[in-house]
Image: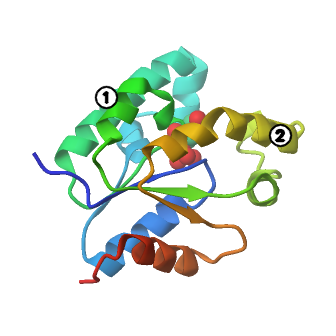
Amino acid sequence: MSAPLIVLVGPMGVGKSTVGRMLAERLGVGYRDTDEDIVTEQGRTIADIFVEEGEPAFRAIEKRAVQTALAEHDGILALGGGAVLDDDTRALLAGQRVVYLSMDVEEAVRRTGLNVARPLLAVNPRKQWRELMEARRHLYEEVATAVVATDGCTPEEVTQAALDSLELKEA
Ligand code: S3P
């Protein structure tokens, strides 16, 4: 069974897919994203799954997608922001090289607060973000082997910091 070279976790909008693709390029490996796997497998958007079946059903689909990707993929793997909520997923991440891309609440509001595609955050985004991060921060920290703060950083800087934190050699 293969294991990903790096698993990326962190809240939505932190830049997992942008940084993940840059890491894959720099390291000469493939990039995979469990959100994309779910959309391909289900043939509908994540928003549609939430609306049609609710969050618990989405989390069950997500859990299977993460298990499959962890077993199959040997490059860079980005997980959806809520994947770490699942106990079994966190257990599977133990022993993996996991980078937590973090941002503080002000950065999160700046990046996503005005994004109408995220209706959960549309009303009082600062409060929503504070609550979301209070519920999840310790879970991201629990699974992380390295934490990279992205506040005020470009994707290139974050990518370099992730490489430095893991002391990985480029291809
Ligand atoms: C979610 C994050 C999203 C996606 C879904 C739920 C969350 O992934 O899985 O909308 O609960 O934080 P990204 O972190 O890739 O945006």
In the image, is 90 to the left or to the right of 110? left
Identify the element where label 1 is drawn: helix
Position of 121 with respect to 73 (left or right) is right
Instruction: Find residue 118 and report its image quarter.
Output: top right
Reading the chain from its start, which is encountered first: label 1 or label 2? 1
Q: Quadrant of ligand 1?
A: top right
Question: Coloring scheme of the render?
Answer: rainbow
Residue 72 place in picture, x, y as percent: 18, 46
Q: Residue at x 55, y 73 (%)?
A: 158
Q: Nearer the viewer, mark 1 or mark 2?
A: 1
List the residue tagged with mark 1: 64
Label 2 crowd bin: few (<14), some (14–19), many (20+), radius 10 Å: some
Q: Position of residue 25 (x, y in %)?
A: 34, 77
Q: Which residue is mark 2?
A: 122
Name the residue at 34% across, 80% down. Answer: 26
- Residue 92 lies, with reference to residue 115, above or below; the image says above
| Marks 1 and 2, how far apart at CA | 29 Å
Is 38 or 67 nearer to us in this picture? 67
Amino acid tagged 2? Ala
